[in-house]
Amino acid sequence: MTGLRALTLATAIISTGAFAEGMEISKNGTRDTFMGPADKFTGTAYIEMVFPNNEPFMVNSGKVTFMPGARSNWHTHPAGQMLVVTDGKGWVQEEGKEKVVMEPGDVVWCPPGVKHWHGATDKTAVTHYAIQQFKDGKNVDWMEAVTDAQYGE
C-alpha cells in the first residue's frame, strides 16, 4: 500500500468515529430491564437492553427471558435477526413451517423479511440474546399475535 493510500485510509477511519476514546463496559445489573409490551408479546417476557445501535455499530441486542407460555408476536426484521439461546428451552417458528425447539448453545438465524415468532415452550422458560441490524433506521416490523391455536400446534 502506498503512503498516500494508507494516509487516506487512516484519515477515513478516524473521521468515521471508528476510534473511541476507550473501552466502555456495561456492568451486569446496571442495564434497563422492562416487561415486553402486551401489543408485541403474549405472556410474561422480560427484556434487558444489552447494547443500543450506536455509530458505527448499527445493531442492537436485548436479552429476552420468556416465562412458560410466553412468546413474541409474529414479526420480521428488515436486515435479519440472530438469536443466541443461553438458558432453558423454547420454540421458534417460521410462518408456514413446523415450530422448532431451541436450547442453550443454539444459534438461530432469521433472514431479512422472514415472518416468525419465538418464545418459551408451554412448560419451560427460555432466555436468548436477540441481535438485530438496522436498515433504514428500522430493525423490526411487528405483526399480529400468535394465537393459542398456532402456539399449541
Image (cartoon, grey):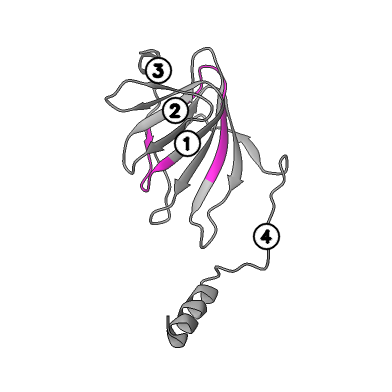
Label 4, label 1: how far apart the Cα atoms are: 25 Å
| Amino acid type for the residue under numbered disc 1 | Leu
The mark lying in front, picked from 3 and 4, is 4
| Residue 28: image tag | none
Location of the C terminus by quadrant is top left
Residue at the disc numbered 2:
118
- Say left or right for 146 vs 60: left
The answer to which image quadrant residue 2 occupies is bottom left
Determine the secondary structure under disc 4: loop
Kind of residue at disc 3: Tyr
How far apart in space, not on screen, are marks 3 and 4 (Cα)? 42 Å
Magenta-highlighted residues = 61-81
Q: Is residue 56 above or below residue 65?
A: below
Q: Are marks 2 and 4 in contact (CB under 8 Å)?
A: no
Identify the residue under disc 1.
83
Kindly report which numbered mark, 1 or 3, lies closer to the viewer in this rendering. 1
Checking the image for residue 23, the label placed there is: 4
The amino acid type, in three-letter code, at marker 2 is His
Percent coordinates x, y for residue 119 in the rendering: 48, 25
Q: Is residue 42 above or below residue 130?
A: above
Secondary-structure class at tag 1: strand
Residue in the image at 43% along x and 47% along y:
139
Residue 53, image x, y percentages:
53, 54
- Decide which of 148, 124 is in the foreground and name it: 124
Q: Which mark is residue 151?
A: 3
Residue drawn at the location 40% of the way across and 17% of the way down = 151
Q: In front: mark 2 or mark 4? A: 4
Identify the residue at horizontal 38%, vertical 56% (top origin). 136
The tag earlier along the polypeptide, 1 or 3, is 1
Q: Residues within 10 Å of mark 1 (few under 14, many from 20)?
A: many
